[in-house]
Amino acid sequence: MDSSEVNPNPEHGVRHLAIIMDGNGRWAEARRLGRTFGHRQGARRVEDIVVACCDQGITHLTLYAFSTENWNRPWAEVQLLMRLLVQQLRSIDKKLVKNRVSLVCQGSLERLPAFVRLELARVERMTSFAEPKLTLCLSLSYGGRQELVDAARKIAQSVRAGTLDPEQISEAVFAASLYRPEFPDPDLLIRTGGEYRVSNFLLWQMAYSEIFVTETLWPDFDRNELADALAEFSRRERRFGKTSAQVRSAEASV
Ligand code: FPP
């Protein structure tokens, strides 16, 4: 297979990977450095992991880069994260193009400073491929509850406009009203930094995602550990509410 082709059936079976990149602060504190260093190192990790995901045949990657709750951090840290995001986008834009990675974003983007929105728009334009190898979604100023509220508002507007009957509201209609309806639900969520929570990330989409938590802090997370997580995923049995026997007999009949 040509390296630019998308592998439609990677062995591990993960099409959409979501990552909560946690532990930048602790990584820096363990080295008696300011949190800034941790975020800088964390931002650099993003490039390697995006390329590793391409190599692994993953088609959708969603990164939790800045949550709605992160606005409550000290203002200096918020500003640093915004500047780092822009610097990182400037340094990886050509690599995204080279690897045929399309960048998209989701969240309350109107809250981001104008210089961040301009940079995101530039890289989105530059990377808008008709057939990307990987689509990278940055969740910025993102909150899962806010996404559900926004979806409910969109649906209510359609009802008010008379284009949707309340009886027609279904899971499919709701899913189509989310920020990125074109993304499949994540098969796997990786959380670095060792905490066992979803932190308001992809609340609707995560209903049946497998969860992999690693103690490794985000600045140390590398392609080997990504490969371990994918291998662990491929050993799990996804039952979607069915029994193990049902799943095995369905697999045997394929
Ligand atoms: C969590 O670590 C990390 C963040 C809040 C920021 C994540 C952002 C990046 C890695 C940069 C993003 C850049 C691009 C291009 C996507 P923490 O500060 O909560 O760590 P702690 O739990 O150890 O304090």
Image (spheres, grey):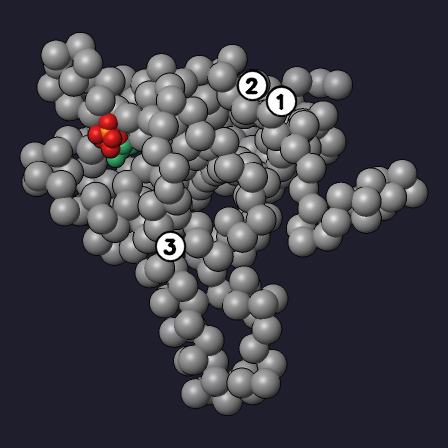
User: Which residue appears at 54% of the width and 62% of the height?
Assistant: 175
Q: Are marks 2 and 1 in contact (CB under 8 Å)?
A: yes
Q: Position of residue 192 (x, y in %)?
A: 38, 27
Check the image and name the residue furthest to the top.
31
Q: Nearer the viewer, mark 1 or mark 3?
A: 1
Label 1 near ligand 1 (CB < 8 Å): no
Q: CA distance from mark 1 to mark 3?
A: 28 Å
Residue 167 visible, this orientation: yes
Instruction: Tell me the SS state at disc 3.
Output: helix
Is any atom of residue 43 visible in this view? no
Residue 252 vs residue 149, the one in the foreground? 252
Which amino acid does the dot numbered 2 rest on?
Answer: Asp
N-terminal label among 1 and 3: 3
Q: Residue at x 12, y 12 (%)?
A: 32
The answer to which of 194 and 14 lies nearer the viewer is: 194
Find residue 251 and report its horizontal and vertical position in percent: 84, 40
Q: Residue furthest right?
A: 253
Q: Which residue is mark 3?
A: 144
Q: Which mark is residue 231?
A: 1
At x 43%, y 87%, the residue is: 160
Element under disc 1: helix
**Residue beneath disc 2:** 228
Which quarter of the picture shows residue 116?
top left
Residue type, numbered disc 3 = Gly
Check the image and report above or below for 35 versus 240.
Answer: above
- 161 left or right of 100 in image: left
